[in-house]
Amino acid sequence: SAVISQKPSRDICQRGTSLTIQCQVDSQVTMMFWYRQQPGQSLTLIATANQGSEATYESGFVIDKFPISRPNLTFSTLTVSNMSPEDSSIYLCSADVPTGKSYEQYFGPGTRLTVT
Amino acid sequence: LAKTTQPISMDSYEGQEVNITCSHNNIATNDYITWYQQFPSQGPRFIIQGYKTKVTNEVASLFIPADRKSSTLSLPRVSLSDTAVYYCLVGGLLSNDYKLSFGAGTTVTVRA
């Protein structure tokens, strides 16, 4: 298993500013992921972050808007840049823990972002 | 990514068994089936994972028929605290779909 923490747990930000969300895993993991979840909706994958390589972004998400860092095997950051009210959402990070032939994915508690 | 289809919502009462069926007609040979539970204001929590036949843990059972085109999550004797959204996902290490794609999920409401 893995325990994942995120900072901050919530924030209220002004339009046009940027926020960096930190994700810490209590063990070394190869693959980490960032998701966005609008209230009452399902999770949408933003990008995959592997240590030592650039993040891979899903359709509709770009590096300029959501730059990601993955400096080591236990840590990643997601920055939400030049924020607008449409960016208000819950942002979750997750990590894959191998279990033989498959993975179990563990999630952080999420960061609730409100942009005014 | 293999697409999944599950009911939008289910209602139950305390003490009853809840069975949620998920369809995944395009599941690949190397895909595993995984179920997650999510409470409001929390990240999803891993419940159970299986490849074929039946898997049981302390929380739930997962039934997978031979053709693997569907799976059923069984929650025995639910309580009010089992009210949550349940997601069915397919993917796995040996397939290219190691990243998980979340569908709409099933909102399970348990009433007293």
Image (cartoon, coloured by chain):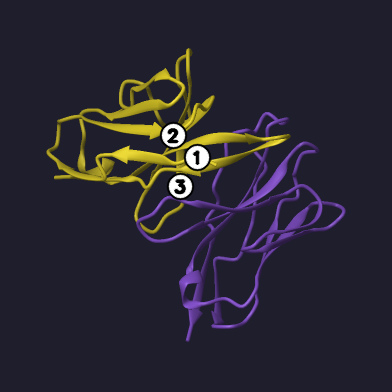
Chain colours: A yellow, B purple
- Chain of the residue under the numbered disc 1 shown in the image: A
Residue at point 50%, 35% (across, down): A95
Distance Cα–Cα, label 3 vs label 2: 23 Å
Residue at point 30%, 26% (across, down): A65
The residue identified by callout 3 is A43
Residue at point 55%, 34% (across, down): A96
- In front: label 1 or label 3: 1
**Secondary element type, mark 3:** strand
Q: Quadrant of the N terminus of chain A?
A: top right
Q: In this view, does A32 lie above or below A3?
A: above
Distance Cα–Cα, label 2 vs label 1: 6 Å
Q: Residue A26 carries which label?
A: 2
Q: Do callouts 1 and 3 mark residues in contact (Cβ within 8 Å)? A: no
Check disc 3 and give the amino acid type: Leu
**Secondary element type, mark 1:** loop
Q: Where is residue A11 in the image (x, y as percent from the top left)?
A: 19, 43
Q: Nearer the viewer, residue A39 or A24?
A: A24
Check disc 1 and give the amino acid type: Ala
- Chain of the residue under the numbered disc 3 shown in the image: A
